[in-house]
Image (spheres, coloured by chain):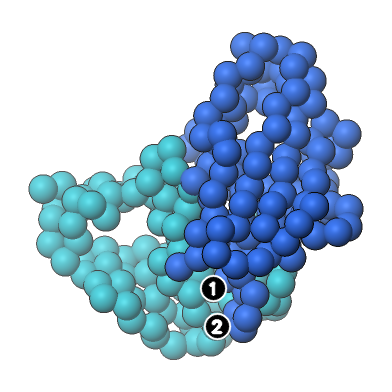
Amino acid sequence: GAVVSQHPSWVICKSGTSVKIECRSLDFQATTMFWYRQFPKQSLMLMATSNEGSKATYEQGVEKDKFLINHASLTLSTLTVTSAHPEDSSFYICSALSPGGQETQYFGPGTRLLVL
Amino acid sequence: QKEVEQDPGPLSVPEGAIVSLNCTYSNSAFQYFMWYRQYSRKGPELLMYTYSSGNKEDGRFTAQVDKSSKYISLFIRDSQPSDSATYLCAMKVGANSKLTFGKGITLSVRP
């Protein structure tokens, strides 16, 4: 299967700081990437859909000014959590849509964010 | 009613057992069906991907889709302790559409 990486794998930051998470498709080009958040023992919650070269589409209830998404190339999307607060602590997972036929979503390993 | 319903479990079985995991859905527009496996603190890993009704087999795993009943299943034969994980069903309307996930079920296979 296709490989998607995320960096960093975990991050601890102080309240009020901003954190950037990178998502890369390593062996394919992805015009569409997705960002999810997952709380303990819960399923994945889609935050936004990221399209290369255009603005991201955010799900209802997700603050676009707080969760900045940039999809500057066909292999890289970034999520920046601005002015992070403890309630933003979560597991953030990206996925990339592999083209060619059935458009399968491949997920990254996730980034664990802890805001103190 | 949620679009995708999945028994939350947890489920515990002895090694070697046959495991049956199920999801039901309400949106008849769903055309693509997937099963993902997620180990603790890791991203989901695609296990099975099916487009039409019927069965698809891959090693010890069999995915079954019944569109008329809006029901999908994942069967695991000869279950192993390494199969212990959370299993998520997911489905989408179109090839480029976003996924709708079930809540996931945690499976534990006892040695």
Left or right of residue A36: residue B15:
left
In this orientation, does residue B100 appear?
no
Residue B107 vertical placement versus A11 (above, below) = below
The chain letter corresponding to cyan is B
The residue that mark 2 highlights is B51
Left or right of residue A50: residue A9:
left
Which residue is found at the position 82% from the left and 31% from the top? A66
The secondary element bearing badge 1 is classed as strand
The secondary element bearing badge 2 is classed as loop
Q: Nearer the viewer, residue A82 or A59?
A: A82
Q: Please, which chain is the residue tagged with disc 2 on?
A: B
Which residue is found at the position 56% from the left and 58% from the top? A26
Which quarter of the picture shows residue B22? Answer: bottom left
Which residue is found at the position 15% from the left and 47% from the top? B110
In this orientation, does residue A92 appear?
yes
Residue B69 place in picture, x, y as percent: 53, 80
Query: Which label sits on residue B33?
Result: 1
Which residue is found at the position 66% from the left and 37% from the top? A21
Residue B104 place in picture, x, y as percent: 47, 51
Residue B41 place in picture, x, y as percent: 43, 38
The 10 Å Cα crowd at callout 2, few under 14, some 14 to 19, many 20 or more, is some
Work out whether disc 2 and disc 1 sit on a shared chain.
yes
Do the CB atoms of the residues marked 2 and 1 lie less than 8 Å apart?
A: yes
Which hue is chain A drawn in? blue
**Amino acid type, mark 1:** Phe
Indicate which disc, 2 or 1, sits on the residue closer to the N terminus.
1
